[in-house]
Image (cartoon, rainbow, N blue to C red):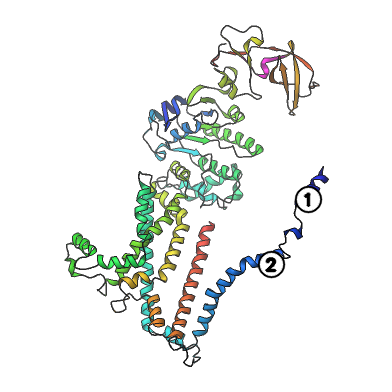
Amino acid sequence: MAEVELAAITKNFGRTCALDGVSMTVPDGAFVVLLGPTGAGKTTTLRIVAGLERPESGEVRIGGMPVTSLTPAQRNVAMVFQQYSLYPHMTVRENLAFPLKSPQLRTPPEQIERKLREVAEMLQISHKLDNRATALSGGEMQRVSIGRALVRNPAVYLMDEPLSSLDAKLRADLRVELKGIQAEMGATFLYVTHDQTEAMTMATHVGVLDRGRLVQIGSPREIYENPISIYAASRLGQPRINVLPADLFAGAPAGAKTIGLRPEQIRQGEGEDSIVTRVEHLGDQTRLHLSFRHHALVTVTDPHTALRSGDVVRIRPERPFYFDASGARVH
Amino acid sequence: MANSMIERAAAATPSVTARRIRGLSDRAIAWIFVAPTIFLLLAVNIFPLIWTIRLSFTNFRANRPNAEVEWVGLRNYQRILTDADIWATMQATAHFLLWTIFFQVLIGFALAWLINRKFRGNDLWTTIIVLPMMLSPAVVGNFWTFLYQPQIGLFNYTVAFLTGADPTSFSMIGDVALAPWSIVIVDTWMWTPFVMLICLAGLRSIPDSIYEAAECDRASNWRQFWTITIPMTLPFLMLAVLFRGIENFKMFDLVVQLTGGGPGSTTELTSINLKREAFEKWRTGYASAYAIILFVTVFGLASIYVKALNKVKER
């Protein structure tokens, strides 16, 4: 396991700029999740660390060693691809054993067998070991592709949305499982996802990417509680942060253009009137859609609430975020 | 609501009588469409085949249609299978097949592999390489006789230039030992592009991401080639072998133009031999038996091969 450093990485595809001076450090044993919408440069970052793409400028260091000019094989990285990339003509067993059968490694066969059984067990694919890789469901393929990375002991695990095509239950199981593996092995993970639950539950650090720039990096709590911009604030939190004109409420600081309110930043029962437009019972929580001076906002309330659409709720912002005209945080 | 939906669906479905054309049932219409093809198949394929089988048991001669035809039983077959000349022909054909397939697959795959690397102008190169395939075999045979000319031939000149031997000291077409190779070379020159195209399709069917995964799994280029490229293009390679095998089993025009089966009968492939029996010696019954034997051979080999191919494809 090793630390991974990116220093001022720039990457263009033709005339589109995929990464624009990205610098970050993935500490040894950290679980770094990259968040951002499609096209933000998450996958490109991963591929540059893997060595599948060459940056135009900047340097990649793994364990302190510059690896920018090395091949993926020389970098000793394991990657899980979003499109699985299994070897279609091989069985699940052969797929899992492939990285271990590297001639340089000379892993003894019984050790390979033991390792792949262990991984198959964990990913619940033991009964599929002799299936063709093409005769699997999407979720099974994805698990095999995760397994193919986990059989190894690389400098860093790179995962590109590895849980995206699994059903909710398996995703929740594997989330815990992957996090457990990472913590137990002290492995370094660089992980790309759209799913903020994954980011919140697994990450030691979250990096927020916006159109090729790393706008904020920190622990999930830090990003959640202290976002530097509207963009970073809207990456995390469910329901999403409400962004309203700052002058809607009293007490906005100078230069503030908008106010950001997470559900817990909306104190209910005090302040000014708002009208309930919709009540969503989700079981463990209830979402309240409110209309406040013709602005819609969403918050969370008691699961057993008696509120109904049309009722009036008084609300007051509590330690909200303020953003300026460019979306940057002012207070 | 559900009721009205069913009613609407029922109304939209044309009634059975409306679908019929002038009182014909669907089945009858289907037969009318298929009949011309079936008739043509019967007339030009099935009937001649059955007729040939019948003739193969007789001593019928097509140049004497009015002579009395004698039923000879299996004698034609017996004579063919014990004829040393025919076995020599079969052997020549087998050699021709094996060597042309070997060279075409080897060179075709190598070319495809080179063309598949992304470089500027590879489309242009593909077009240039594919050119020989587009020529008529008669034309190819004809101009290779010039290339093989000991005095003026470019082929002899090139070989002489490379080896230092005298260009007039050997004749590709005239020499008993070289003549079989002369046809292998021309066929390879002409049909390697075809194998290349099939191999190229195979190589292009492998997504880049598979190689990327292998790269991350620390597989060397050598290992990637043997564990990914070859197994994943194998069905395509086998298909190329099948096509070339069937084509070359009935090779005729090119060889007739080039060597005419000679010198002696060293390049007399079965199809040329058969044509001689049927249309020069006019031993129609005998030639029919010969044709049936060839048919059974090719059919047998091809079906075994196709079974193997399907097995590979299933993986």
Q: Residue at x 40, y 79 (%)?
A: B274
Instruction: Name which residue lies at 54% across and 58% down.
Output: B314
Relative placement, left or right, of A56 versus B308 is left
- On the image, which quarter does residue A293 sit in? top right
Per the image, the residue denoted by label 1 is B11
Amino acid type of the residue tagged 1 in the rendering: Ala
Q: Residue A192 in the image: state x and y as whole percent.
A: 53, 32
A53 in magenta: no
Q: Is residue B29 above or below residue A93?
A: below
Q: Which residue is mark 2?
A: B28
Q: In this orientation, which residue lies closer to the viewer: A8 or A147?
A: A8
Q: Quadrant of the N terminus of chain B?
A: top right
- Name, please, the residue furthest toward the front: B22
Name the subunit of mark 1.
Answer: B
Looking at the picture, which amino acid does disc 2 mark? Ala
Q: Is residue B152 left or right of residue A6?
A: left
Which of disc 2 and disc 1 is earlier in sequence?
1
Q: Secondary structure at mark 2?
A: helix
In the rendered image, residue B99, in percent from the top left (x then y), is placed at 35, 67
How many residues crowd mark 2 within 10 Å: few (<14), some (14–19), many (20+)?
A: few
Which range is magenta? Answer: A259-267
Image position of A101 with respect to A190: above or below: below
Q: Are marks 1 and 2 on the same chain?
A: yes
Based on the displayed image, in which of its 4 quarters is residue A258 positioned?
top right
Q: Chain of mark 2?
A: B
Quadrant in the rendering for residue B22: bottom right
Name the side, left or right, on which B138 lies relative to A32. left
* Distance (Cα) linking label 1 and label 2: 26 Å
